[in-house]
Image: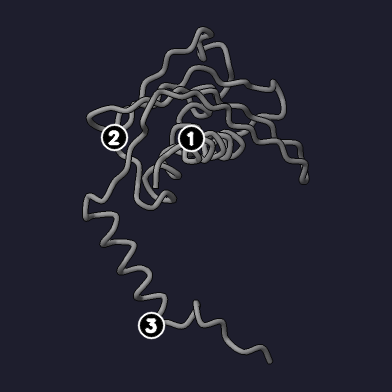
Amino acid sequence: MLAPDTATRPQDLDKYLSDWVSDLTSGSTTSLASVMQARGLYSRVTNHIQDAQVILSVAPDEDLSVSVEMEHPLESVEHGEDYLRAAVFGVLDVLLVEARPSVRHVRVTILDLVVHPTNSSVHAFRMAGRDAARKVLVEVPR
């Protein structure tokens, strides 16, 4: 039998969750120094192929905001609105929850979604949004 990992003991988990909630609600944030663009990619072959790309711009701002400035309308893309929503949630997953401290004072602009006619999925766009946000975090001062 393996010895229990100390990070999974209940008291450690309770402290971690308590610290995480405290940090999330304390207003501890960081921001970008300048405008930047990022391309998030997700391509996986499992029981089916999943492909997605998200291109976005992130700029310092007074508050968190998200806008869409795409050249190509999503109305002609099946599930286009779902893909867009998933990409935005993927970005927010990283900026608000994964980043420590969180990055809240930014304007995120979705510039383009690259949709494959048969291999794109909601999950792929959420993961591509996360990938783009992680690329942005590399430039955030800690």
Residue 34 drawn at (x, y percent): 38, 26
23 up-or-down from 97: above or below: below
Mark 3 and mark 2 in contact? Answer it, CB < 8 Å.
no
Query: What number is the disc on residue 11?
Result: 3
- Tell me if 67 is positioned left or right of 6 in this view: left
Query: What number is the disc on residue 105?
Result: 2
Compare marks 3 and 2 and give the one earlier in the sequence: 3
Query: What number is the disc on residue 136?
Result: 1
Residue at x 30% of width, y 39% of height: 104
Secondary structure of the residue carrying tag 3 is: helix
Measure the alpha-carbon separation of dots 1 and 3: 34 Å
Residue 125 drawn at (x, y percent): 57, 33
Query: What number is the disc on residue 49?
Result: none
Measure the alpha-carbon separation of dots 2 and 1: 13 Å
Q: Residues within 10 Å of mark 3 (few under 14, many from 20)?
A: few
Near-viewer residue (128 or 100): 100
Q: Given the image, on which type of amino acid does mark 3 rest?
A: Gln
Mark 1 and mark 3 in contact? Answer it, CB < 8 Å.
no
Residue at x 45% of width, y 44% of height: 94
Residue at x 53% of width, y 18% of height: 112
54 up-or-down from 102: above or below: above
Q: Given the image, on which type of amino acid does mark 1 rest?
A: Val
Q: Given the image, on which type of amino acid does mark 2 rest?
A: His
Measure the alpha-carbon separation of dots 3 and 2: 33 Å
Q: Quadrant of the N terminus?
A: bottom right
Q: Residues within 10 Å of mark 1 (few under 14, many from 20)?
A: many
Mark 2 and mark 1 in contact? Answer it, CB < 8 Å.
no
